[in-house]
Image (cartoon, helix red, strand yellow):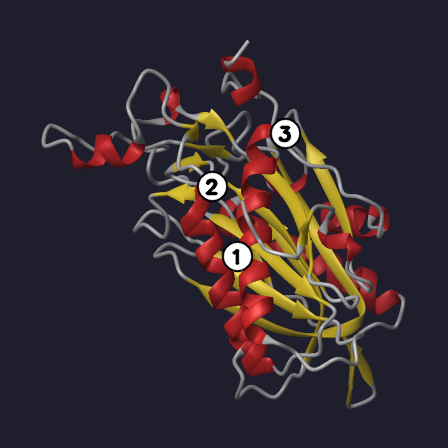
């Protein structure tokens, strides 16, 4: 991918004030990932898929009262996994991170979940204690990628059914725009569609023994398989920058970041996906925000994070990883 004088590489944790922690349960095939911003960050969200599972997203609307959030939770377990956000709140409250209201400290923790109940043990979903563990493990160090955290049970290329799917995962990337301005992304990739190389359009992960997902869908003989095929999807993630943004600008950045999903996942934003992107601004840079450059960087970081999620994944529950298929 060509991004001019900007530099692509690193992780979302390169952005000062951002920490990431994973909880992974390989036996059950699920997990969760927390993106901590203990001191608070301006946030926005864009929900583009038609089947989302989210929490506290209304608070991120530019007209809502709350100005900052203190963490974002990405979790497996479908809607059941959203309960894990209580563990993030508990961790932050114990350490007095949150907004002050009526004598109380109230951490604001929006969340999004992906459907991974078709992998290994569907009765096990991330809970509050698991998310609390992810918080304890959170740091600003380079974050582990692949089949960990919210990407543990993630799968892609499921248009022909789960038996033809390829392992998804979670990935992270960062773009440096110079003058200390950074835009990072972390994305858990559990898409219905294929993952492609954004620079060339060539397939990285597609249904085993099938053509591309788009070609399968457009085939007049296509018949939608039974669940957990096209029903078990969703790509969720966070972009973060140290540029100072308003809530309106953060919401716009989250919206633009969805283009990164469209570049790397085909088809994206389907009726069976709940694609959701959050945006965080730690505001540590005093330079004026350039939304043109920040938006372009968010797209590139998101697309690269998706590629890294799949290429770092490992097989689980009988679902092979791309690296295994190429051996």
Q: Name the residue under label 3.
A: 312
| Image location of residue 317, percent across then percent down | 54, 20
| Image location of residue 251, percent across then percent down | 53, 74
Residue 184: quadrant of the picture: bottom right
Q: Which residue is drawn at 55% across and 14% down?
A: 324
Residue 25 drawn above or below residue 46: above
Q: Which of marks 1 and 3 is nearer the N terminus?
A: 1
Q: Nearer the viewer, mark 1 or mark 3?
A: 1
Q: Mark 2 points at which residue?
A: 199
Residue 232 drawn above or below residue 322: below
Residue 211 drawn above or below residue 39: above
Mark 3 neighbour class, 10 Å CA radius: few under 14, some 14 to 19, many 20 or more: many
Q: Which residue is drawn at 80% across and 74% down?
A: 284
Q: Mark 1 points at which residue?
A: 299
Q: Which of marks 2 and 1 is nearer the N terminus?
A: 2
Label 1: state its secondary structure. helix
Q: Which of marks 3 and 2 is nearer the N terminus?
A: 2
Mark 1 neighbour class, 10 Å CA radius: few under 14, some 14 to 19, many 20 or more: many
Residue that lies at the very extreme toward the front in this rendered image: 5
Label 3: state its secondary structure. loop
Label 2: state its secondary structure. loop
Mark 2 neighbour class, 10 Å CA radius: few under 14, some 14 to 19, many 20 or more: few
Residue that lies at the very extreme toward the left in this rendered image: 220
Residue 25: quadrant of the picture: top right
Question: In front: 155, or 249?
Answer: 249
Quarter of the image where the C terminus is located: top right
Q: Which residue is drawn at 48% across and 40% down?
A: 190
Question: Is the residue under label 3 in contact with that under label 1 (CB below 8 Å)?
Answer: no
Question: Is the residue under label 2 in contact with that under label 3 (CB below 8 Å)?
Answer: no
């Amino acid at each position: 991918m060509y991004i001019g004088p900007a530099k692509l590489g690193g992780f979302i944790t390169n952005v000062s004030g951002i920490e990431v922690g994973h909880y992974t349960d390989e036996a059950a095939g699920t997990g969760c990932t927390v993106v901590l911003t203990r001191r608070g960050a301006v946030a926005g969200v864009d929900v583009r898929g038609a089947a989302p599972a989210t929490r506290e997203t209304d608070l991120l609307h530019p007209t809502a009262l709350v100005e900052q959030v203190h963490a974002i939770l990405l979790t497996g377990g479908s809607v059941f996994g959203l309960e894990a956000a209580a563990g993030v709140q508990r961790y932050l409250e114990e350490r007095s991170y949150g907004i002050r209201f009526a004598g109380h400290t109230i951490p604001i923790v929006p969340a999004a979940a992906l459907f991974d109940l078709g992998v290994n043990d569907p009765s096990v979903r991330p809970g509050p204690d698991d998310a609390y563990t992810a918080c304890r493990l959170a740091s600003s160090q380079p974050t582990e990628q692949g089949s960990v955290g919210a990407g543990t049970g993630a799968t892609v290329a499921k248009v022909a059914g789960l038996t033809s799917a390829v392992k998804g995962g979670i990935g992270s990337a960062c773009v440096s725009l110079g003058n200390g301005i950074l835009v990072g992304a972390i994305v858990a990739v559990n898409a219905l569609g294929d993952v492609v190389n954004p620079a060339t359009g060539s397939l990285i992960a597609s249904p085993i023994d099938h053509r591309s997902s788009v070609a399968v869908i457009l085939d007049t003989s296509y018949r939608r398989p039974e669940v957990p095929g096209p029903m078990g999807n969703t790509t969720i993630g966070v972009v973060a920058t140290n540029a100072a943004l308003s809530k309106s600008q953060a919401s716009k950045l989250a919206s633009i970041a969805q283009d990164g999903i469209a570049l790397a996942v085909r088809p994206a934003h389907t009726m069976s996906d709940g694609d959701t992107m959050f945006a965080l601004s730690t505001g540590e840079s005093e330079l004026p925000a350039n939304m043109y450059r920040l938006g372009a960087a968010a797209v590139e970081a998101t697309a690269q994070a998706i590629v890294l999620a799949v290429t770092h994944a490992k097989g689980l529950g009988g679902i092979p990883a791309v690296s295994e298929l190429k051996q």
